[in-house]
Amino acid sequence: MWVTDLADGRAVLTNAADPNNLGETVAGWPMPTDLPVGVTRLWERACDQFRSGWVSYENFTDAVRTGFEVVDAALRNHVGDLLVDGKRRTLGPLIDLANDDGRLTPRQCEWLSVYALRFRNRLTHADGAEPLVLSPGMAAEMMEGIARFVAELPSASTS
């Protein structure tokens, strides 16, 4: 259940043990229907992981990790026409490439550089010594941000 009574108007997920509430949360995230198959598949996997958070709390963190794979895949698609050298670039260099070519707004570049890259690296390259565990509310907010970013990013064919 989401309760919107915080001073800043944000909603708080109050019952992460209810799969119906998690399903309703996922249904509210905006995602275009014309995404490449690989991006769509990753997004569906991330949403499935989030919905299964009631089974295992770690699934919320795994959902966000997969969500950042969606960001990587969507950005790779966005600059696909610039990747002619066959060189596989990680997220940081992809951000630089897109920004240098004028494919990102200043807000998108900041979101990717300051937020997405930092959290993605912490989740992907964790050594287990200091695990990053996300609460349902934190994961929901991050997933919603990922969905908004991907939804506003045109594909390479339309950019």
Image: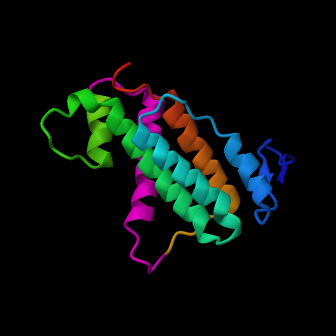
Is 116 placed above or below 65 here? above
Q: Kindly indicate the quadrant of the structure image that contains residue 86.
A: top left
Q: Kindly indicate the quadrant of the structure image that contains residue 136.
A: bottom right
Q: Residue lying furthest left in this view? A: 85
Residue span colored magenta: 101-130
Determine if residue 116 is in view: no
Q: Residue lying furthest bottom in this view? A: 129
User: Which residue is depicted at the point 54% across and 53% down?
Assistant: 46
The x, y position of residue 59, in whole percent, is 59, 66
Q: Kindly indicate the quadrant of the structure image that contains residue 30.
A: top right
The x, y position of residue 138, in whole percent, is 65, 57
- Residue 77 is left or right of residue 81, and the answer is right
The x, y position of residue 119, in whole percent, is 46, 56
User: Which residue is depicted at the point 79% across and 55% down?
Assistant: 20
Is 127 a magenta residue?
Answer: yes
Is the stretch drawn in magenta largely helix, strand or loop?
A: helix
